[in-house]
Amino acid sequence: MPTLTQDLLKELFHYNPDTGVVTRKTQYKNGPKPGSIVGCKKPRGYVMVNIQGKEYRLHRLIYTYMTGNIPDEIDHINGDGFDNRWCNLRSVSHRQNQMNRKIPSGNTSGIMGVWFDNARKKWTAEIMIRQKKKYLGRFSLKKDAAKARAEAEIVYGFHKNHGRAM
């Protein structure tokens, strides 16, 4: 299989950066026809594309299509892995990508990094920095724990969308 280069991707596909839609320019064997939309939405939240028997995440192909570079990691700025508009994609390090996450589904407080400590009857605020948990304090009021967490996110350079609802 040929290396996925910007030239090859532009030969195979057309990308509309305003809509994020990728369409086929060519037909491979008995596959989809030219003009058909590329990709399949997968349960893990990304659009996947099959090129000659190998699956790729569409947003990674788009980045190479647009820049000619193969990214280490791509962040969907708004958290929607199906939104492949160019304005929603950015090349980031793994650390930067982790600093723009949705709130986990198991979160019970509604605030990233804030939880109620039943044993102490206090709200606890924490933040992960370089894979280490940093304790921010215990608080009588949830809003004070949320404030401590928000301030820490600013200090450590988290993306403004970090902790948004799913």
Image: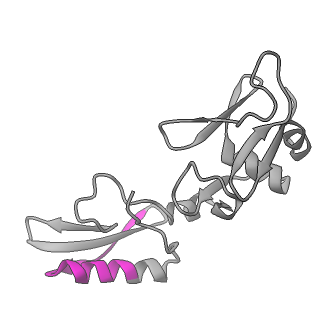
Which residue is found at the position 92% from the left and 44% from the top? 7
Is 118 magenta? The answer is no
Question: Looking at the picture, how far across and down is residue 118, in whole percent?
Answer: 9, 64
Question: Looking at the picture, how far across and down is residue 66, in whole percent?
Answer: 81, 55
Which residue is found at the position 90% from the left and 38% from the top? 11
Residue 120 appears anywhere in the view: yes
Name above or below for residue 149 compared with residue 7: below
Q: Nearer the viewer, residue 117 or 112?
A: 112
Is 144 magenta? The answer is yes
Question: Looking at the picture, how far across and down is residue 33, in whole percent?
Answer: 78, 26
Q: Tell me the quarter of the picture where residue 142 sits.
A: bottom left
Q: Is residue 13 left or right of residue 124?
A: right
Question: Looking at the picture, how far across and down is residue 89, in whole percent?
Answer: 66, 59
Q: Nearer the viewer, residue 106 or 155?
A: 106
Q: Is residue 146 left or right of residue 43?
A: left
**Which residues make up the magenta segment?**
132-150
Q: Nearer the viewer, residue 137 or 154?
A: 154
Q: Is residue 121 left or right of residue 77?
A: left
Name above or below for residue 2 compared with residue 98: above
Q: Is residue 38 left or right of residue 146?
A: right
Name above or below for residue 16 compared with residue 135: above
